[in-house]
Amino acid sequence: MRILLLNGNISTSVTESLAAEARMYAAPGTEIVATQCSRGAAFVASRASEVVAANAMLEAVAAYQDQYDAILVAISFDTAVAALREMLPVPVIGMTEAACHVATMVSARFGVVVPGARSAAVYRERMVGNGFGPRLAGMRVVGPSAAVLYGDPESALQSIHTAAQALVEEDGCEAVILAGAALVGMHHRLQPRLPVPVIDGIACGVGMLETLVRLKLPKPQYGSYALPEPAQLEKIDPALAELFANPQPSKP
Amino acid sequence: MRILLLNGNISTSVTESLAAEARMYAAPGTEIVATQCSRGAAFVASRASEVVAANAMLEAVAAYQDQYDAILVAISFDTAVAALREMLPVPVIGMTEAACHVATMVSARFGVVVPGARSAAVYRERMVGNGFGPRLAGMRVVGPSAAVLYGDPESALQSIHTAAQALVEEDGCEAVILAGAALVGMHHRLQPRLPVPVIDGIACGVGMLETLVRLKLPKPQYGSYALPEPAQLEKIDPALAELFANPQPSKP
Amino acid sequence: MRILLLNGNISTSVTESLAAEARMYAAPGTEIVATQCSRGAAFVASRASEVVAANAMLEAVAAYQDQYDAILVAISFDTAVAALREMLPVPVIGMTEAACHVATMVSARFGVVVPGARSAAVYRERMVGNGFGPRLAGMRVVGPSAAVLYGDPESALQSIHTAAQALVEEDGCEAVILAGAALVGMHHRLQPRLPVPVIDGIACGVGMLETLVRLKLPKPQYGSYALPEPAQLEKIDPALAELFANPQPSKP
Amino acid sequence: MRILLLNGNISTSVTESLAAEARMYAAPGTEIVATQCSRGAAFVASRASEVVAANAMLEAVAAYQDQYDAILVAISFDTAVAALREMLPVPVIGMTEAACHVATMVSARFGVVVPGARSAAVYRERMVGNGFGPRLAGMRVVGPSAAVLYGDPESALQSIHTAAQALVEEDGCEAVILAGAALVGMHHRLQPRLPVPVIDGIACGVGMLETLVRLKLPKPQYGSYALPEPAQLEKIDPALAELFANPQPSKP
Amino acid sequence: MRILLLNGNISTSVTESLAAEARMYAAPGTEIVATQCSRGAAFVASRASEVVAANAMLEAVAAYQDQYDAILVAISFDTAVAALREMLPVPVIGMTEAACHVATMVSARFGVVVPGARSAAVYRERMVGNGFGPRLAGMRVVGPSAAVLYGDPESALQSIHTAAQALVEEDGCEAVILAGAALVGMHHRLQPRLPVPVIDGIACGVGMLETLVRLKLPKPQYGSYALPEPAQLEKIDPALAELFANPQPSKP
Amino acid sequence: MRILLLNGNISTSVTESLAAEARMYAAPGTEIVATQCSRGAAFVASRASEVVAANAMLEAVAAYQDQYDAILVAISFDTAVAALREMLPVPVIGMTEAACHVATMVSARFGVVVPGARSAAVYRERMVGNGFGPRLAGMRVVGPSAAVLYGDPESALQSIHTAAQALVEEDGCEAVILAGAALVGMHHRLQPRLPVPVIDGIACGVGMLETLVRLKLPKPQYGSYALPEPAQLEKIDPALAELFANPQPSKP
């Protein structure tokens, strides 16, 4: 099967890192293809730039011509997951929700390390919004911002380690999620230093999608994830307009 | 003070209806100005078209040159409220969250009449996401879809009345919110027929914003609603790119 | 319009301070009138004295002869709000619930500074009882008791500042409510020192009531806030007995 | 031991019925004494009259001169329980919270039959406020009001039976609480007709208090149920004023 | 009445300690009899050994020939309570759920001292699963494990005292539960040092059962606690097989 | 990889049906092996027989000598999942929790069809206990009991179809889980008749475990799922005693 990894920003190097990580965990026979937005931010760091990214992600999917069986939303806010899940005939999952699913399969309650105070509330809203509130035991912020954090990986590793330890020892977390797509791969270095599973969303998302593809569940014909009625949207990207005008009930 | 009513679709006639309703409830001295998106849907009826609308709403705000003191998001999904609240130095509120606030001031628990099964989950996610779950006693769907419902106002009125009565008598709701911007004004006709307050979000939003403007609370300098760092977003609408590049710490 | 500010204790000087604060935020055309209880405590500091205050507040309203359009309950436990909302034909709101409403309009989650450990559970019960649990991120106690705290305003200011900072930095609160009517006005001094909005309930309550009055929602005729049946209560304050015997379906 | 049953209204006949019911379930050696309010309503049927009852209940306790070891609040809104628990050195429990405790010991989730739509929200607020929300599976209203219901006991019995069956069969309730002090004793007639336990609060309250008295837990010296500081309350009932001025740290 | 105290492990000395504690709080006329498992662990310290204990507890009950009116499950995980409640015609309660019930009758919110990080999640699951989440304010772990803790009672007492104080002062707990059957009796020494009630489950369970026995509630004939249909279980303990084959609808 | 499907009852024919279903969804390279309990019930239909099954499942695992990489608990109550997850070095998941995970990936909120009123509360406890409460929109009971239901598959199919439709149309469920291992395979027939995904836990469990095995998360060394200390359990099944005495830190 082919999984399309969709990066929510415009950085091809980030796309490549994410895809490489995804490929490490894919089952035999699973191919990871990847794309990113053609406009927007190099790094989504605000609620507002996420809005731009969401729109650009729809455009990127509309523009993507090759076949695929599922979409992995590879931006840690799980941007546009609900819209893509509604609009497309294939399974869609976000990397952070995938991490939360896995965390609840290996722990009683889990914790999250969050890059920058600005993003803490956003992650909490998404996790609680997805229903993970009863299993979320703690959230710790590292770094003044994600940008600063990512600028100094060694220092970041140390800060994240300290935060993760506090989640375990003070908040009783039995698994730790590293939030932030830019942290992808850091779990390889962090896991040996921590007594609980360290969970990265990309790896989890690949597995969840493989499962969903094999389940062959039908596209809903009722409710908020059924295919929308065809609609004429004006003055938007032509490929996206075409997608709205002719939503596809079966796989590309 | 001036309140900017921001319609999330491209219909100027809907904008005018919404603005007229807003003006009916504005305090003396409050001016309602209004704008809408320059692209997107005539009617936002899916999760996916909401993503397009959110982006277009940011563009509309970036393009809007006149002064204003607050923004009323006049699309019933409360689209882009969090992003606008973050990005702008003025208060922002959505019409549906405003309705929920008012409902909890006049009832023990409230109910919602929702146009179309497709939108029920979306409204619930927003209301619960905003923390109104403990006060939400029921939600009833009317019509096969919002589009069909709005196409026959007399029939819609009857359906909504029946649904609202069921919310009161079967679910114990002590106030009823009419969700859906296209229903604006219908509460005038429905209220005389129901024994509990019927709440329309536009009117509520005007009052909430008047309050917020008078409170003169400072723009947060911490957390998820603080002004984002300046950012270069590529290949997006020039006015919006300028807003991201130079976020304004004080009122326009 | 006229808003009746109802102080739950017998101190006219507190009434005056509260009314002065209310007037600072009232819209043009809003008149603030004020009254207090004729019996009870100078300062409501226990669950038991709140019971006495609630009864005295009903008596105060029964005795109040002038016209008004809404009632602002100016005691920070929001004492008797539900009973007044039921019994009277005009909107009623409590200062603390009003503060919570506003806090959720400007922050992801908010925190509360509470005077004295004794009152912490009471505030939490009220806030959670009003449904604000999902948005309440932290509560910090200052001072051995409210009485001691209010006795030394400079020291109180410092303690409150420290507590508020901890709410922001450790608990991730994006707005801070100062609970306690006796703290009224302190937010003016505290706001410049904190990076998030500092919220005072009196100001918020004025705005919420102005909104409710303009909405002209009808008195419920169903449920727990409908006007009670006339009832003969024995051996109680004559004016209050008269109010129970002849509940007024329209504004005084 | 002696348990003081405190009726929240002024009807001595209701007091006697309640006391008789309590005596049926008391352990050997437990004496039930009873009193009621000297002013207020014959029947508490509104949020407002409950406020008056709460004050009168404090007065009744202040006036009560004999010794007792615990107080059973025999008014189904559990009026003034928190204030009495704070103010007195002995255990205090309300009949409805006692019923909820017992219901959760014999069922997975329970339901409640409520007299009159007006009171449904109040019972729900109390039960959820006491933390029983996760175990509350349904609430059904019978009768236009409690007054009408109590006026025709045979018809009431039939209505309650129908409501209770619906709680069991449609809502999956595994126990049923009859709310409303005026329904006391009806469970004797209803139990044989229902396949799940029918729970009356008076009987439960007696047992809970016997337990609490035997546990000999100390009066809290910290928090919201610690004895308040002595306070001078003006122009109130002399015996109650004395109680506030000299709160008793040990049993009367 | 006779209450059967059922110890979930095989230690007769622990059974005796627990029974002695129970007798201290039993009402006049209540006889405490006790038994324990004939196989399994001397101390249940894991989720897996609890599974073995649950099965052994059913066997112990099946083997117990004398009469009794209720069962007190005297293992602090409340092991097998639901199964016993279903299978037997008499009331059953667990010591920890009993403690939670009492804690909510004397405090606004309570805290728990837990022996060993391994058991913290288990206690939380049970308490939240029983619906006590809204009243649970804090949980503090003492000791590397329960085994180590119990091996040095003096040191344990000090650690528990420190943890309990933190629950009160930092988390605002107004009562403290000591979790862990092996801690039975320690509350006698701890109570004088703490300003809030210290609650031991054995004492609470005795009182709850005395109440339930006096209530004479019928065995449910509907739902998850109704007597199961007779069933043939193969190759299990003969006495237990007999109990499954002939569930007893009335008291032994 | 090899997944061990563990049936909680003693029926080899059920084991084979479950294994056949599992094999339909397994990825290339995944081998499904299966076993069942050597004692207990042919069909687990009560809380009490589940206790026996849990113990027998531990014994079955202790007795199982071949290698495997993960365990799928193929009994719809998810019996003993937590104990196995703790005790074993490999991933463990229950079929019903797996179904819930998948349901939340394809719907806003899901519903459950439950065989028999007796089991409804048990499924709810498990689902809510696993944290799925916020996503659970409805639960409908079919049949007087699971046994009766399974005895007439055609009639069962019709009943389940009706219940599932009600979940969709009345409760707004966007996916439906069929609870009950004995229903395995029925989703193949039901799916074509329903407009939303119909979810069977066996298929979901296989995918979740394939994911977990590929993630290679380490066995926790902290918390409630860390390997227990070696313990001597007396008079139990020898193989199980050996497992407790020598818990294996790495895969069999």
Image (tube, coloured by chain):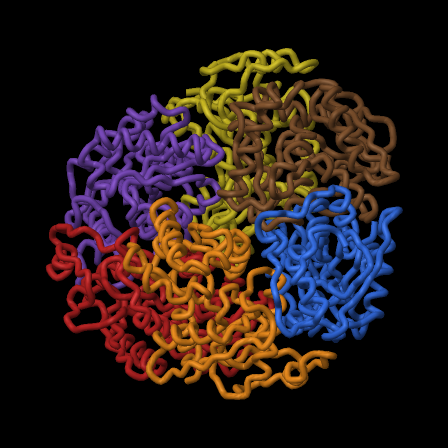
Chain colours: A brown, B yellow, C purple, D red, E orange, F blue
On the rendered image, what quadrant is the C terminus of chain C found in?
top left
Residue at coordinates 78% horizontally, 37% vertically from top-left?
A: A25
Image-based side of D175 in relation to F32, left or right: left
Q: With respect to residue F246, does B16 lie above or below?
A: above
Image-based side of C87 in relation to E33, left or right: left
Any part of residue A54 in sight: yes
**Who is closer to the viewer here, D12 or E99?**
E99
Residue F107, image x and y in percent? Answer: 70, 46
Residue F126, image x and y in percent? Answer: 62, 59
**Who is closer to the viewer here, B195 or E167?**
E167
Residue D188, image x and y in percent? Answer: 43, 82
Image-based side of E141 in relation to A187, left or right: left
Image-based side of D122 in relation to A13, left or right: left
Residue A151: image quadrant is: top right
Residue at coordinates 31% horizontally, 72% vertically from top-left?
A: D214
Residue A47, image x and y in percent? Answer: 58, 26
**Who is closer to the viewer here, D70 or E154?**
E154
On the rendered image, what quadrant is the N terminus of chain C found in?
top left
Q: With respect to residue E237, does B220 lie above or below?
A: above
Residue at coordinates 41% horizontally, 68% vertically from top-left?
A: D179
Q: How many marks on residues?
A: 0
Q: With respect to residue C142, does E68 lie above or below?
A: below
Residue at coordinates 73% horizontally, 79% vertically from top-left?
A: E235
Residue A3: image quadrant is: top right
Any part of residue B11 in sight: no
